[in-house]
Image (cartoon, rainbow, N blue to C red):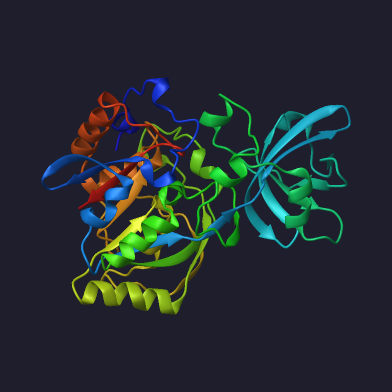
Amino acid sequence: MNVDLFDFALPPERIALRPASPRDAARMLVVDGAGLHDRSVGDLPAALRAGDLLVFNDTRVIPAQLEGTRGAAKIGATLHKREGPRRWRAFVRNAKRLRDGDTIDFSNGVTAIANDRGADGSFALNFAGDEPVELLLERAGRMPLPPYIAAKRPTDARDADDYQTMFAREAGAVAAPTAALHFTPELMAALAASGIDHATLTLHVGAGTFLPVKADDTDDHAMHAEWGRIDAATADRLNAVRARGGRVIAVGTTSLRLIESASGEDGIVRPFEGDTSIFITPGYRFRGIDGLVTNFHLPRSTLFMLVSALMGLERMKAAYAHAIAHEYRFYSYGDASLLLA
């Protein structure tokens, strides 16, 4: 499909720079067969049905944004995928000043050797020393806010909490599964009281999620790979919910992509561990999910293509036009939508 089909005009003032407070006070646009409904995230227990299951991504964001030097040259690095115990693939700023074998000093005793430059301009960074890389990043790194927020304000102490979900457990993401940022213990208790259960899986979100689609046609876009895992017990729970007539509602496109990667043509979710580069565009037949909670996405992005595949392109364009006209807040710290196919 032509990528231009997924374009729309977004006023810059609609981009949220801070999350709602409290988190579950964010607005929520419900899109279903009956039309568009303006609600709030706190209304989720009433918007869903007893027997439904919400699926959250329990990945934890690491401080993956690094600033360093190679000699006199300033080098910026954003880690995006782990390739070994001490090796991370990274997008590099000022990469023209970096060659294979160069050492980057990220200060605070943290250094890495860059090699294996990729076709996309990324480098593999091999961290020196014996300390776990996670400890090195705590010393030298900072939270990797999305570029559309980082361009408008610096990262600060609030982001360490704001950009982490209440489910964050498995360290390894360089971007938050932002739909889950809206959830609070109080909301989870209300959902449970309404007979709505939840489960977790792990998909380590990479910085590739922010890469623009440069191809003119979706068939020519190379999707980034991310590592994920669904264990056998979780797969069994998802299958049992649908078998008894409940709905599996993915919270975030990361949860959705992993469930679909683990689902067969028969609609059965199976245990999964490994990389997925699934790219969902209109025409895709969803196999493992019945709905999605997600934020509002960028024009021409793979994520807007995904929601258009779930609900239909014209319906999603109408929903986004409604959201813009009614001053919903967009992107990572913005408001939510509930999409019920």
Left or right: residue 244 versus residue 207 is left
Residue at the image position 54 percent from the left and 58 percent from the top: 168
- Asked whether 84 or 325 is in front, the reply is 325
Question: In terms of image quadrants, where is residue 198?
Answer: bottom left
Q: Position of residue 18 (x, y in %)?
A: 50, 34
Residue at the image position 80 percent from the left and 36 percent from the top: 68
Q: Is residue 139 above or below residue 199?
A: above
Left or right: residue 81 versus residue 190 is right
Q: Position of residue 262 (x, y in %)?
A: 39, 67
- Asked whether 102 or 131 is in front, the reply is 131
Q: Position of residue 147 (x, y in %)?
A: 55, 32
Q: Can residue 281 be seen in this snapshot? A: no
Q: Is residue 44 above or below residue 322?
A: below
Q: Position of residue 8 (x, y in %)?
A: 31, 26
- Asked whether 170 or 18 is in front, the reply is 18
- Asked whether 124 or 247 is in front, the reply is 247
Left or right: residue 248 versus residue 199 is left
Q: Can residue 157 be seen in this snapshot? A: yes
Q: Is residue 297 above or below residue 175?
A: above
